[in-house]
Structures are given as structure tokens and as C-alpha cells.
Image (cartoon, rainbow, N blue to C red):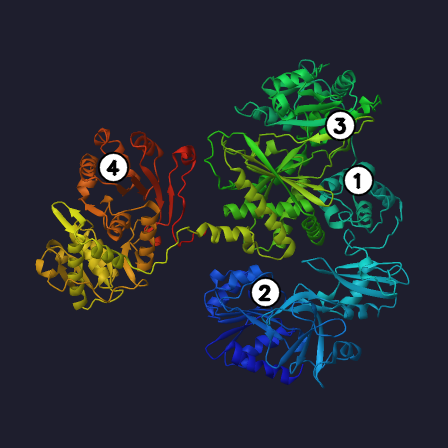
Amino acid sequence: MEHKGVANLKSFFDNVLKLNQEDRVIHFASISFDASVWDIFTGLLTGATLYIMPEDIIGNYGKFEEFLNKNRITFATLPPTYLVNLDPNRIITLKKLITAGSATSVELFSKWKDRVEYRNGYGPTESTVCATMWKYDGEYEILSSVPIGRPASNIRVYVVDKNNNLQPIGVEGELCIAGISLARGYLNMPELTAEKFIESPFLPGERMYKSGDLARWLPDGNLEFLGRKDQQVKIRGFRIETGEIEYQLLKHGLVKEAVVVARGDEDKYLCAYYTAYEELSISKLKDFLAKRLPDYMIPSYFVQLDAMPLTSNSKIDIKALPDPEGRKSLKTLYVEPQNEIEEKLADIWKEILGIEKIGIDDDFFELGGHSLKATALVTQIHKTFNTEIQLKDVFEIRTIRGLAASIKTAGQSLYSSIKPANAQENWPHGYYAASSAQKRLYIINQYEGIGTGYNMPAAVEIEGDLDYQRLEETFNKLIERHESLRTSFGVFEGEVVQIVHPEAKLNIDYISETEYIEKIGGSGVDKAIKDFVRPFDLEKAPLMRVGLVRTEEKRHVLMVDMHHIISDGMSMNILIEEFAYLYEGRSLPELKIQYKDFAVWQNELFKNGEVKKQGEYWKSVFDGNIPVLDMPTDYPRPLIQSFEGDRIDFELDRELTLGLNSLSAKTGTTLYMVMLAAYNVLLSKYTGQEDIVVGSPIAGRHHPDMEKIIGFFVNTLALRNYPKDSKTFVEFLADVRQSTLLAFENQDYQFEQLVDSIAIPRDLSRNPLFDTMFVMQNISSSDLRIPDLRFKSLDIDYKTSKFDIKMEAMEWKDRIRMGVEFKTRLFERQTIERFARHYTNILRTIVECPQILLSQINLMDDDEKNQVVYEFNQEMNGFDAIKTVVQLFEEQAAASPDKTALVYGDTRLTYGQLNEKANSLARRLKNKGIKANDVVGILTGQNHYMIIGILAALKAGAAYLPVDPDFPEERIRYMLSDSEAEVLLCCKENRSLFAGEVIDLEREEVYSEDTSNLQEKGMTGDLAYVIYTSGTTGKPKGVMIENHSLSNYCNWFVRKFGIKKEDKTVIVSSLCFDLSYTALYSALICGSELHLISKQDYSDPEILLPYMEENGITYIKSTPSLFNMMVNSNAFLKTDALKKLRLVVLGGEEINIKDIERFNAAYPDTDFVNHYGPTETTIGAIAERIDFSRLELYRRHTVIGSLLTIRQCIF
């Protein structure tokens, strides 16, 4: 870089950015990158104050936002990849923003364009930081991308073809840069300098830099960036010349050829391809480069080739280079086993992983291992070597070489097989102790409503010549072979027992084609399956049933259902495999043990010290307060949990799946751990809790003797984790890894024992310990294969859910299939669909940025953000509140001066009279020195003087403060003092409560001033009124409301509910609270008739309802409690007493559906509105017209509705 290039920036800072001494700018970029030159001199060359950003602040988006606000930063240049994580609504002081360093998106631009003076810049290092700049002028229409603008001061830009010919407008070409800011070249690299910096063909003597970027001119003279042309790439924001990496690789003595390319679409990574004179260790190659290149230039993948692929003209064919996906980023050389231990370990690995060639330095998890396979490995090592290796050892050591070394030094731990159980003394024949899991399921099955919650149904379509007799014989052979399939359950001597029957006959339920058509009709199979799945009686064996539907010639649907108490997922696979063997007439080896033998063995195991030690571990995990997950539900939780459920399914795409697998490999975890950690984050985001318990099943078959037995082996682990906002995801993932490994190591201690040991109070509305499950299916389902028959698995619409929410994941080819099972008595389907989207968004976030703080993870994608921030905040009839309520009132007074405006007892004021009195009083206030935003107190009580005073204060440009005479004197004095009221309008009995200027509104001479409208009135941005809160949580607080907010609300109400001149309303709440303002202002701004009655009268339905009938009241706004008194009064029983009442607005409290139903029965034509809004939102923010066809929904949860005009509601 040359001085003149930096100096040239000065004119840009002054003339374009217009930075000066009043500005505060930040130094964001690393000092080792050219962007730091820009950052530093935006301050030092303009007189602005330069703030250097600490690294720890940059690494925390929330702290970064706080830093900008705290230091009143006005100007910043940020890369889009960083800016996307910031919230413009939380950054207050920033006035000017430039995005640069990588391509920005239309979405990001849209997010910021209305909050700051927005520019998008472009410039390679070779052009001294900045070459072009685009400024949004407020009208520019963005189509597909944000432009990079026009050339900066003293810069010239050309778009050329491969022969350096200028390209026409709209045609893609290479972007070339010339001008005063061009660099001299590359240090000590004359060849590369000569290649990139050439003589310009357009101006004699001009040098031109060929950037390698693709661009095109737009018709308006701006440039559109289209990507990269050559191998110069950007990885994670770093601009990298891949030629430099190739140059360093070729310095290695064993490397013959090298090419480095960037792969991936959005999440780019570097891959190095090379040929070498011999096998080259990648770890050594990486070490070699690390001594010569910065970390960000080290390729993620290395691929050694026998020869480079070439094009027809003998150049390296980049497109033909193999995809590195599936290769290890730290691929090791194959090293064969060196001794007997390593050979045996390699054989075990081959069996478990299904891979033929395994080296002793290969990584177990990179070869496809996961926690279930790791558990199987630990078991096989114990069986083979009589040595126990801990599960965590597999995760930490990961290689055959390392495990062999551990086995050599480990002590002996003799492996023992499970022995056949002896009959229990003094027990009936066939009675055996149930396993721990069976006991739990038996007890759960006694609960009312469990129904088919623990059924395991499956259905398969069979095409071909099916032999009915052989089909039934096969199933009966399976029952004969597996005792579980002929076991029932009961209670003996106070203990749950399993009863193994000598035999149990299975009769298949056949439905003939004729019966199928007659009973089910054309819609058939789904209905047949639904009828087939029904509750089991656990006291009757077999706890399996089979059904067959003949749909047409040579086509059937086979249905199988078992109770979970005798089966699990792996059992289903065993059943499928053995069914195929037996149907084909093949024999199976005899089983050495049965499930009852395991159950007896397990009960004995619980008595030994090891399992007791495991119990101590679990008790320590749940020592102290145990959290209850407080998930927001759509419906109230039933007192006794219901198992009615539904399910949604979705899929994680190939790119995301690869990213998750890559993340697990880099962090030394498994895919299960990564997805479990993300699920914890999701639950934490939904609940705000940082102590989460999630249930997760484990196969429970860690002893080899259990492999081929059908039965219920699954244990459930209660995994407790702490997703604190202050942790990064990688830090939290490490915590999850640790807690999961410890849980796996202590898996023999059964869930039922844990629940009993910590004595959790039984809550029939919930499951013990947790209400949500996460399941990772590592077991691939077996396919049914029989010659001459073709099978197709059918989905079952199974409407049950044992937990509030169960998230399931299963790897399927290069994707992950997901499912969410949920209780329909708690959640709507669309809620769970959104839940699934949020989970997917978290997964994408952690793949893109594993180091992100949990506090910075956002659940919503851009579509949902737009929906909740913009779409949900739109009102069809938006209103620009350019007129105040006083102006609107004066328009009515001018149009209908003789129409009755206000009725209070015997006092009746027309619009003309009310306007004149308010004008006269307003002038008196102005004469007292009252001006805009001053506060005028009004202490008159519930009468017409209050209305006159309100209008007068507003006409004078002041804000009014309504004060109730019934308030304690101390509160009245506090309100007047705290609000700094300048004048008090009152009646004579209240004069002594205010030491300042007092005007008695009962004195006629008060209204002796000019009665014409005042020329100067309050503006829309001025205060309209001050309302004090009740002070129940402390001192009352004065809420200040402006004219535009009041006008906006009133116009919305009038338009929304069609208030007309013919309407009449009565105020049935205190004028000192804004609940009354709905009726007050809606009437006065549209010429309606407003009635006032005393608090004593409107609080008594026996007085209020006859008054409403007598005066033809058409609409009211009331509290639900007052309305309750109305519909339960004697006056309400009078026929047609309220026949003219067309609209009832309820607000201030939760509505009572029974009251509304009662009123609707008598007056079906009256509309009801549920109205919500704290004082701070100007009377109301949300309203819902009650739909009487949806009252059941209102009973379950109160709907407060959609937003009023020009309001935003953000949760």
C-alpha cells in the first residue's frame, strides 16, 4: 500500500461520508487486515473519536450492542456475517452504517435500511480497502441483490471479458480496478504481481488490477457483485489466495503436485489435493503448513491422489477432483494390527462397524461409531479379554492402538454369562419376578386412560402368493421360541410377576375381501389398522395379535401389534428376521436364555455394590430441588394426564446433516450428543429455564447374552443439563457430553429405582422427573425379505403420546428423519410444527457458528420474524393520526352544534355548548401561563365539569391529570406534586388540596372568556394526559400519553366497530382511569351522545340497566366484574331491557364465558369484544370480536385478539 492510497480516503470521508468531530467511530477489524486501515483513519483523518473494540466485546453480540449505545457510537463499518447477529431495535445511537468484507443480503439490508444511513461497500486489499460504494437513498428498488455501488473518489472500475474487452451493461465480466489507490503489488512475489497488476488497455500509462471478482453494470450506473472468478476465496470472512497455500505445500519435500480449492456453497471450506512420492501423514502435513501459514489458511480437508485429473489441454480438471465429503479431515494412514490384542480388537470393530479394513489408528466414531455401538464395543471387550473398559475410555481413546494399550494395563474382570433362572421357591409354576421396567409398565397400565399408549403396532403390505396356514404357523413357532410372547402379568404376594405359559395359541384375525368391502368400504386399510390397534389385557397371553386384510388378489396388509411390556425396538428387528427364516422353513439356533432369566439376573444384580454405587451417582444428580419443565401449552394441563396424541414428521437436509456430523467429529462427541444439546437449548428458549431434565431411552442390552432375546430391555435415562445463557454452544456441548457419558456408565440403575429413591411427589398430570423425551434411533430397522413376496412398510396413524413432547431422530442415508410426538390435550398441531422449525433453526445456527453464546441463538427464521414483527402488526385500516381528538371534536361541534353531546343528570349540553365552555376555560388556562406539555390537574368527581376540564386542557395544549376525590388525601397530594401540575381544576370542596393555582369550575365567571376555537392547539406529539397506576406494587407511577397515540386509538375504535352519530353510550367506570376513555372519546369525535352517571348508579345494575333502557344506550365498555353483576341482576330478567345495546366491550380483567353465553341467549344480536391493553399502550392494544361458534376455545384459553392500528406487539 502507498500513502496516496490511504490519503485518498480522506476526501471520501469528508465529501461522501461527511464525518466530523461530532462523530464517534469504531475500530472493529483485526489490525492484521486491511479493513483496519479504513477503521483507524475514519477517526484519525476526520477529527472523530475512535473507539477500539475489545476482542471479548466483539465475541459477544449483546455486549457489542451495549458498547455502541454506552459510547454513543454514530458510525460503523461491519461485515454482513457479523451484522446479521445484531438487532437494529437495540442499537440506538448509530446513524451511519457500511457493510463490507463480503456480500450482503437483501434481507440484511431490509432489516437496517430504515434505521440508519445505509451504505454497502466493496474493495479488495489491492485497492486500499475501498473501491466502490452504494448508498441507499430511500427509494432504490432492490430486486435480487444489494449493489456494491459506483467507483469511489479517484477510482476507475471496468468490467471486462476474458480478453479484457469491456462488457456491455448487464453482462457479467471480471471487475478490474484502476486509479490512485492501487497497491504497488505483492511483496517478494513479482510473478503474481505481474499477473494481477497489468497495463490498462483503456488509458495510456494506467495500471489496472484484475480482481478475479465477477460483476456487471446495472442500467443506473451501479455495480452488481456476482461472485468469484478465480481461486481467490473468502473463508469465514478471511480473503485467501489459494495459490499461496499451494506454493507452501510444494515446499514439502514429498509433495509433487498440489491444488487447493474452496468447496461448499455458503459454508465454504478449503480442500487441498496433492500427489506425493509416498504415503504422507496428514497430521504431519498440517504441522508443516502451520509453521508457514496462519490458522485460517490451513485447509480443512487433505486428499492424496495417485494422479491429478487433467482436461484435454493437460490442465488440472478442477471439476473432476473427488468430493472430500465422507473423508476424515485428519485422515490417517492405514496401519495394520501389530499384536494379538490389536488383531482381536480389529475383528470386534469390523463386526460392530461393518467395515472390512480397519487400521489401528482409525477413529472409532469417524468410522460410523456412536454411543450404542460404543456400548456394544465395551461389552465385547469384556467378553473377549475379561477386562472392563469404561464407555468414556472409548470416547477419549477412540483408536485400536490406544484401547489395546489400556487393555494391557487394565486389571482382570472375569466375564460371566447369564444363567437360566431357577423356579422361585413356593411360587406357582411359571411365576417369575418381573424386570424393573416391566414393573413400571404394569403399574402405569393400571392408570385410567392409558389405552393403547404402550402398544407397538406395525403394518406391512404384502404382494404375492401368501400362504395363510404357513403364516399362522410361523407366528406360533415364534411364540413357542420366545417365552416373552407367551407371558402374561399379575401380582403375587404383593409383587408384580411375569407368568410364562407353556403354550399360547395365536389366531390371526382374517378379513375377507367381501367383508372388507362391506364393513370398511373403499377407504379401507387405514380404518382396518385403526380398529386393529386396541388395548391389551396384561393378564392374558399372548400379548401380541396379528391381523390380515385381503385387499385384492395377491395383495394383503399384515398387521402386528405387541404390548411394550414384552418387546422393544430391537425385539421388533429380531421378530422380523426370525419370521423370515421360519416362514421359509429354515431352522434357528436354540436360545440359551429367555427374558425371564434376564429379569431374575437383573434383580440379583441390583443387590450388588456396583449398582448401588450407580444409584448414588443418580441421587447426586437429582439432589436438591428438581426442576419441572414449564413449557407453554395451548390448553390447560388436565389434572390427570391424557395420552391422546398426534405426530408430525420432517427431515433435515443433506447439507445440515453433514454439518452436524462434522460438528460432532470436531468436538469429539456423537451426533446424538449434538442434537440432544440443541434440544436442551430449544427447551430452555421456550421456558426460560437453565436447568433442564430430558428423558432418553437406552437399549439396555449391554450384556452379549441379551442380543437375540425378544423382551423389554430399554431403560430410560433422566439427563439433567444446564444450558446457561453465558455458555457458548461448544462449551454446553462439552457439558452434555460429560453428563451423557456418566449416564451411560451408570445405566444399570433403573429409572424406576431412581424415581423411588428420590421420593418425587406423585402428580397425576405429569410423568415423574420429566415430560419430554429425546430419542436417537441408532438401530437400523430390518427389512422383511422372503422369496416370491414383496413387502412395503405402511405408516400407522397412531394417535397416542406418552409424553408431552417426544422428539425423535433417525439417520437415513445422507439425511436425518425427524418426528415429534405430542399430546393433543396440550398442544395444537401448528404449535408443534413451529417447535420443529425452531429446532431446525437452532441446528443450522450451531453448525454455522458453534462458538455462539446460547443467549445469542435465535429460534426464528426471517420469515417468522417478519410475521411476528410486521405481518402480525399490520392493521388493514391503518390510520395516520395527523389530527388530535380536540380537532376531531371541534369538527363535530361545527357540523352539529345543536346535537346533544353530553348528558349528566338534568344537565344536557349540545356539541356547540360543550365546545364553547371548553374554549372559554382553555383561554383562561392560557392566560394563567399554561403551555404545551404542562400538566393540569382535574379534581371534580364523575360529572360534566370533568369533561369540560378535559377538553379545555387539551385545547390549551396541556396534558390533563384526572384525580378521583375518593382517593386518600395523601395519594391526591402525591399525584399533584409528582406530576408537577401547574393548575388544579376542581369543585369548591376540593380547593384546599392544592397549594398552587386553583380554578373552581362551579363558578360561572370561569367561562367568561372568548368562546371561539383557539388557533394554537396541542400538536400530535404533545402530551394529552397523565394517568397514575394503582400503586399496588409500590408507589403509583404516572403514565404519560401523547396526542397521536390517543387519536390513533380513537380512530381505530370508531372505524372498527362502526360508531355513528346515532349511537349513544354511557360511561360505567371512573373517569380517572383510561377504561372510560373508549366511550368518552369515541362518542365525542363522531357526534354520538355521551351519558355520565355517578359511580353509585353505574355500580348498581338495578339502576344502571333501567337507565340504559330508558336512554337507548347502544354500546358500552365495562369490566367483566361489573358485567357479571349486570347479567345476574333482577333488572336483566326484564324482557327486551337492553334490546338497543348492539356492542359490549369488555376490558380490564379476564372475561367470563358463562356471563357472555347468558347475555347472548337473551340478546343474540349483540356483539362482544374482548379488549386488552395496559395504560402504557393508550387504553388498548389488542382486541378480539368474540366468535360464539368458538366458545370452547375461549374456555380453554382466553384469546385477546389482534393488534389495533399502528401498533407492534413483540414477545
Earlier in the chain: of badge 1 and badge 3, it is 1
10 Å crowding of disc 1: few (<14), some (14-19), many (20+): some
Residue 976 horizontal/vertical position (percent): 22, 59
Amino acid type indicated by mark 2? Val
Q: Is residue 429 above or below residue 192?
A: above
Cα distance in 3D space between marks 1 and 4: 81 Å
Earlier in the chain: of badge 4 and badge 2, it is 2
Foreground disc of the pair 1, 4: 4
Residue 878 in sight from this viewpoint: yes
What residue do we see at 73% from left, 14% from top? Answer: 503
User: Residue 146, labelled with which disc?
Assistant: 2
Earlier in the chain: of badge 2 and badge 3, it is 2
Displayed quadrant of residue 284 = bottom right
Q: Is residue 646 left or right of residue 791?
A: left
Cα distance in 3D space between marks 4 and 2: 59 Å
10 Å crowding of disc 3: few (<14), some (14-19), many (20+): some
Earlier in the chain: of badge 3 and badge 4, it is 3
Earlier in the chain: of badge 1 and badge 2, it is 2
The residue lying toward the viewer, choosing from 287 and 433, is 287
Kind of element beneath mark 2:
loop
Amino acid type indicated by mark 3? Ile
Foreground disc of the pair 3, 4: 4
Q: Is residue 316 left or right of residue 691?
A: right
Q: Which residue is mark 3?
A: 576
Kind of element beneath mark 4:
loop
Q: Which residue is mark 4?
A: 1140
Amino acid type indicated by mark 4? Lys
Amino acid type indicated by mark 1? Ile
Foreground disc of the pair 2, 3: 2
